[in-house]
Structure formats: structure tokens, C-alpha cells
Image: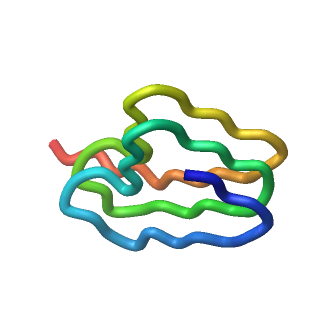
Amino acid sequence: MEIKNCTINVLSSVKDGISCNEYFLMESGTLNMSNLGDDGIQCDLDGTTNTGDMRLLVAHST
């Protein structure tokens, strides 16, 4: 998966926010994630972020 110059909002997910079989490449843009059931980004092989903004809201339940 490649992300270039865009905004992606993942407002809720039962499992992973984004799941990639091979790789995740974020060249630029904004990725906002909240209310995730598991991993924010699950990559089986490789994950890279270059000059992008990634915001993960992590809630901890007791």
C-alpha cells in the first residue's frame, strides 16, 4: 500500500486499522486513526513513513 499526499481517517475498526500483505509506504499526507481493536498498521513485510503525519489515539481500558 502506498499513500501520497492525501488524508485518511480510520474512525473505528474491529481489528487492525490498516492491514497490508506486503508493505506500507507513506510518502506524504495525514493518517488519523482512533478506536482500533488491534494494531494501527499491520504489515507483513515492511513499513516506512517519509515526511507524513501519523496520529494514533490510544485508549487504555482498565
**32 with respect to 5 (left or right):** left
**61 with respect to 3 (left or right):** left
Please state the horizontal and vertical placement of residue 39, each as a whole percent of the image: 33, 42
Q: Nearer the viewer, residue 6 or 58?
A: 6
Instruction: Name, please, the residue furthest toward the right.
Output: 51
Q: Nearer the viewer, residue 19 or 57?
A: 19
- Quadrant in the picture for the C terminus: top left
Please state the horizontal and vertical placement of residue 47, each as a whole percent of the image: 56, 33
**50 with respect to 33 (left or right):** right
Q: Residue at x 79, y 40 (%)?
A: 50
Please state the horizontal and vertical placement of residue 10, each as a whole percent of the image: 44, 69
**43 with respect to 12 (left or right):** right
Q: Nearer the viewer, residue 57 or 42?
A: 42
Please state the horizontal and vertical placement of residue 56, each as a whole percent of the image: 51, 51
Q: Residue at x 27, y 64 (%)?
A: 13
Q: Residue at x 77, y 49 (%)?
A: 27
